[in-house]
Amino acid sequence: MSLPVVISETGLKTYEAISAQILQRLGNKALNDFRKNTIKTLELIGSSPLMYKETEFDPNIRIALIKKLSSVFYEVKPDKIEVLFFWDNRQEPVNWEKDI
């Protein structure tokens, strides 16, 4: 099952925020690695949407590890995969009722 991947507005904003933080803290090489790994992960999600772990609160929302420091949350829909947001794994865990 292969589906198109679309990135939500929140997904784009969180991607840009993490990218800016990586550039500031670790430099261009780390940013390029993050971008390359993100593309690879999104391609995998598009070709095999169910390969990553379901979240505890909704089986249609899944989390994929991009690298040790970041993850992407996405929702599997009948006709597409929607990237909900990117997450810096060094942050506190998500309190869904409060944070999202």
Image (cartoon, helix red, strand yellow):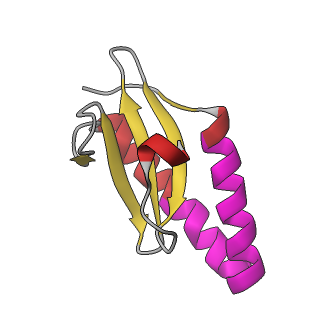
- 42 inside magenta stretch: no
Residue name at image x 53 percent, y 48 percent: 99
Looking at the picture, tell me which residue is in the foreground, 43 or 85: 85
Q: In this view, does 65 lie to the left or right of 13?
A: left
Total marks drawn? 0
User: Which residue is most to the top?
Assistant: 79
Query: Which residue is at 67% across, 74% downward?
Result: 22
Place of residue 5 in the rendered image (x, y in percent of width and height, measured from the top left)? 48, 31
Seen in the picture, residue 23 relative to 96 is either above or below; the reply is below
| Residue plotted at (54% across, 52% down) | 86
Note whether 75 is above or below 17 in the view shown: above
The boundaries of the magenta stretch are 11-37
Tell me if residue 30 is in the magenta stretch.
yes
Left or right for 18, reference 34: right
Give coordinates of residue 49: x percent, y percent: 29, 36
Chief secondary structure of the magenta portion: helix
| As drawn, 14 above or below 83 | below
Front one among 54 and 44: 54
Residue at 77% across, 79% down? 24
Quarter of the rendering containing residue 78:
top left
Q: Which sits in the foreground, 39 or 81?
A: 81
